[in-house]
Amino acid sequence: MAQRRRASAPLAELLRPRRLEEIVGQDHLVGPGMPLRRMVDARRLISMIFWGPAGTGKTTLARIVASGAGYAAESLSAVTSGVRDVRDSLERARQRLGEHGQATVLFIDEVHRFNKSQQDLLLPATESGEIVLIGATTENPYFEVNAALMSRTTLWRVHPLDGAALSTLLERATALREIDLDDDAAEALVASCDGDARSMLTTLDTAIVLAPADADANQPRRPEARVRVTRAHVALARDGRLVHQSRDTHYDQVSALIKSVRGSDPDAALYWLVALLEAGESARFVARRLVILASEDVALADPQALVVAEAAARAVEFVGLPEARLTLAHAAVYLALAPKSNSITRALGAATAAVRAGGAEVPTHLRDAHYVGAREMGFGATYAYPHDDPRGWVAQRYLPDELADAVFYEPSVHGAEANLAHDWRRRRGDAGDAAASPVE
């Protein structure tokens, strides 16, 4: 029976970790001395929400944390469960606590799918400690989960798996399936899954099925022969979307997309965007690059650029491919057409260098003056409240004394940034700078 299960069950299920030590890629949560490991070791859990993309182990992490800390487990999916299911789970948790003294973890997958009344139903039991709630979501919980429920939970980010973690899973998979996996095939599997372990293992399972079909038809395949999975099998398992993209080509095409947008060439931006998607690049990866570009290369020259790029990234998660190609094209062309400024990139670098140099203290007039004794020490005593001035601005020092003359941000003369800087200088009364005409 066990052997049949190994043969038929998906790799993603067979390789599902059973202990904290088997979890890969989330060392910031379960590594030695990290928060979730410390909670499990103390056998004391606090209600929490796991936020991260699909295939990163949120459900598995919840199960292991619950069992490792000695809690009973109730599990619901917000997609298929209603109010009655929630009430039944809460009632079982109360009985378990009252009759056996055992606390219960109520795990809710896709918790953002619960409506307000369903989320509100969890509040009393979570607050009283009758249950420990663990929710999992792929959506930003600050937008999708009630503020009241968020205030009763701790939010933990679950990261996409990095290359090292995915490679570890591939080693386990090849040992379990007793196959040979070419290095470039492993490289393609890792590169194409965008940190989603379940997606990678599903592709590998498909490639394993397809691999024997390539055996020489004139040579009968020996039953004991090991299956060899090549890059071509991985590409076939992904409908050919890896065929035209080697590892070097991947990085070259990403670089070409970034530089085409930065260079304000919408045609080239579209070409390299399509080249990446046709080669099987993750839409999520492309969307992330466009969001970064919006701040790195457009920024205040067009303040709407980040809004467009972030909306495109959310649409990718909501719509998925192939329809999301339209949204990515929309964002790429918009960013290419937008005026460019790297003033924020340069300002951030300069400010970071100054902070890392260390030694600067908060000026006395800017320090918190809202606690007993602060005024006696002179904290905030000379602070001037800008809203009390009819100009809405007061000349006073905000940087540390050691950096009084430092300038980190230098506005560009491109797009909306020129107008923003002109108005800012005019309000401050910088006569010389304000005389410069804004860019129309």
Image (spheres, rainbow, N blue to C red):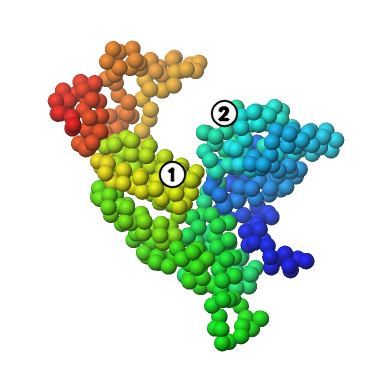
Report x, y in % for residue 73: 74, 43
Quarter of the figure that contains the C terminus: top left
Left or right: residue 13 compared with residue 294: right
Residue nearer the viewer, 67 or 214: 214
Residue 354 image position (x, y, % from top left): 33, 39
Q: Is residue 382 visible?
A: no
406 on left or right of 192? left
Q: Is residue 31 above or below residue 78?
A: below
Q: Which residue is identified by label 1?
A: 313
* Circle 2: element type: helix
Q: Nearer the viewer, mark 2 or mark 1?
A: 1
Q: Quadrant of residue 35?
A: top right
Instruction: Characterize the local packing of mark 1: few (<14), some (14-19) or many (20 or more) Cα atoms within 10 angstroms.
Output: many
Q: Residue beneath label 2, please? A: 147
**Residue 146 to residue 324: above or below:** above
Residue at horizontal 23 percent and vertical 36 percent from the top: 415
Specify few, some or many for label 2: CA neighbours under 10 Å numbering under 14, 14-19, or 20 or more.
few
x then y, percent, for residue 162 = 50, 56
Q: Secondary structure at mark 1?
A: helix
Quarter that holds the N terminus: bottom right
Which mark, by number, is residue 231? none
**Vertical placement of residue 195 versus 246, above or below:** above
